[in-house]
Amino acid sequence: MASLDPEFDKDGPVLDTDGVRLTVDGAIATVTLTNPDKRNAQSPALWRALAEAGRVLPGSVRVVVLRGEGKSFSAGLDRQMFTPEGLPGEPNFIDLARSSDAELDAAIAGFQEAFTWWRRNDIVSIAAVQGHAIGAGFQLALACDLRVVADDVQFAMRETSLGLVPDLTGTHPLVSLVGYARALEICVTGRFVLAEEAVASGLANISVPREELDGTVRDLASALLAADRNAVIETKTLLRGAQERTYEEQRAAERAAQARRLRDLAGSGD
């Protein structure tokens, strides 16, 4: 079984920059947030590195694991972004607010690219989440297909307390997972969602003791790899589109997908 720990990847990281490390071992890629001293706080540089990880991901990869070093998965935005000085080489929020509508929209769209590729149909992504997953950290976990959480996890959306909204693609999956009313309450109050509620509400697939997190993710990755890759891609495509289709449209999509699989299997048997 491929390792989730970068130190066991013999060929070294594919990418290691700005608090993000991408390693690949066979069909499993691991994306690790590598700034535990700042609880893996996020910045535009980190977002650019995450987007780049998606671009350089080898086509042989079937499962992508997202994890954070240290006690917290990610405590959200680097608060220095809110100061007049900002982060070195990056526009602060005041600068962004003073830009034109087109420039501001393009800047936020660029930030969102770090959060979009995890749901590609050719991979299954798993967030291994421990400790704090706040704001941008919560949204990064929501960007993945599956979430395995440690029993010390603390999810929270704190954007409204700062006068902001969750804008890093987290609102769509949050509503899909827990429904509108609970999503609204979580976002507006900014309260913590702990492990038991996360599993009960559908935010997380499973909760395990902290020391079992990596092993549980390994087992899940192994189970995912045991399935036929093309069948997984077709199934993921069906499920992702189900909410946008009518019942009859979904029936038709199922028939078309199954026809492709049957023809492919028949052809491979020639």
Image (spheres, rainbow, N blue to C red):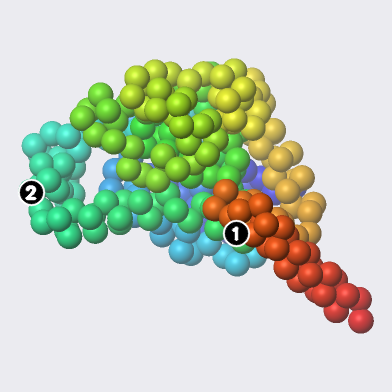
Q: Residue at x 59, y 18 (%)?
A: 196
Q: Quadrant of residue 42?
A: top left
Q: Secondary structure at mark 1?
A: loop
Mark 2 surroundings: few (<14), some (14-19) or many (≥20) residues within 10 A: few
| Horizontal arrangement in the rendering, residue 218 relative to residue 203 (left or right) | right
User: How far separated are the C-alphas under marks 1 and 2?
Assistant: 37 Å
Disc 1 target residue: 121
Q: Residue at x 74, y 39 (%)?
A: 219
Extreme residue in the bottom direction: 270
Question: x, y (%) of residue 267?
Answer: 85, 79
Question: x, y (%) of residue 228?
Answer: 78, 59
Which amino acid type corresponds to the residue marked 2 in the rendered image? Arg
Instruction: Determine which of the numbered discs, if any, sits on residue 98 in the image.
Output: 2
Extreme residue in the right direction: 270
Q: Is residue 152 above or below residue 248?
A: above
Question: x, y (%) of residue 25?
Answer: 64, 55
> Sequence order check: which comes first, mark 1 or mark 2?
2
